[in-house]
Image (tube, grey):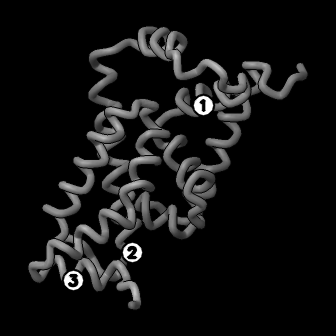
Amino acid sequence: MIAKDDNELVYEVLHGSRSSFEVLIERYQNKIHGMILQMTNDREIAKDLTQDVFIKAYTSLGKFNFKYRFFSWLYRIAINETINHLKSRRHFESLDKVRDIVAEDDTRKGIPEENIRLKDALLGLKDSHRSVLLLKYYFGLSYEEIAETMGLSTAKVKDRLFNARMTLRDKLIGTGFFGHD
């Protein structure tokens, strides 16, 4: 059996096939969840937001433009939902409180110090930088795919990636990540 491409599945969903949307969920659920988890560092929130992303995608599917890739459109929804959640959460929790909770997290026991420093540095980046780094290095998207996903020009993606890498490098140097002064 030949697997249908995303656009065929979207077309079928728009014409009443719920099972076609289930295929799209199965195809992208783990990737979306992984991206959200990397952005939030919270498994429960990542689960909830992943569900919200697919609900929003389903209810907004009529607005999908077939000249774009479905996964880019879906990732954009996921990024927006996650950023909106992070912004709303900032009103209720101070950064110091979040850092204290992260430092006390038992799940960090046995994890190499370099991994913890890298994750902390990523979490310390502004959302636009963290998003572009995750899309490039976690998901392996090309500049063009990131541009399509984020609604930016390819030149802007390259610029944002450069700035994100420099900011991340500076944060890591500040933590002694590289082992030299």
- CA distance separating discs 1 and 3: 39 Å
- Number of numbered callouts drawn: 3
Decide: is 115 above or below 161.
above
Residue 113 screen position, x and y as percent: 71, 22
Residue with the most extreme front position: 1
Q: Mark 3 points at which residue?
A: 11
Marks 1 and 3, the one that precedes in the sequence: 3
Q: On the picture, is 151 further left or further right than 167?
A: left
- Amino acid at dot 3: Tyr
Marks 1 and 2, the one that precedes in the sequence: 2
- Amino acid at dot 2: Arg
Decide: is 101 above or below 124.
above
Decide: is 58 above or below 34.
below
- CA distance separating discs 2 and 3: 13 Å
- CA distance separating discs 1 and 2: 30 Å
Is the C-beta separation of discs 1 and 3 under 8 Å? no
Q: Residue 69 carries which label?
A: 2
Label 1 vs label 2, nearer the camera: 1
At a point 64% along the width and 43% down the height, the residue shown is 163
Residue 136 screen position, x and y as percent: 59, 56
Q: In which quarter of the image is the N terminus?
A: bottom left
Crowding at label 1, few (<14), some or many (≥20) Cα neighbours within 10 Å? some
At numbered mark 3, what does the secondary structure look like: helix, strand or loop?
helix
- Amino acid at dot 1: Lys
Q: Mark 1 points at which residue?
A: 119
At numbered mark 2, what does the secondary structure look like: helix, strand or loop?
loop
At a point 55% along the width and 57% down the height, the residue shown is 139
Residue with the most extreme right position: 180
Residue 89 screen position, x and y as percent: 30, 24
Q: In which quarter of the image is the C terminus?
A: top right
Is residue 136 or residue 29 the one in the foreground? 29
Marks 2 and 3, the one that precedes in the sequence: 3
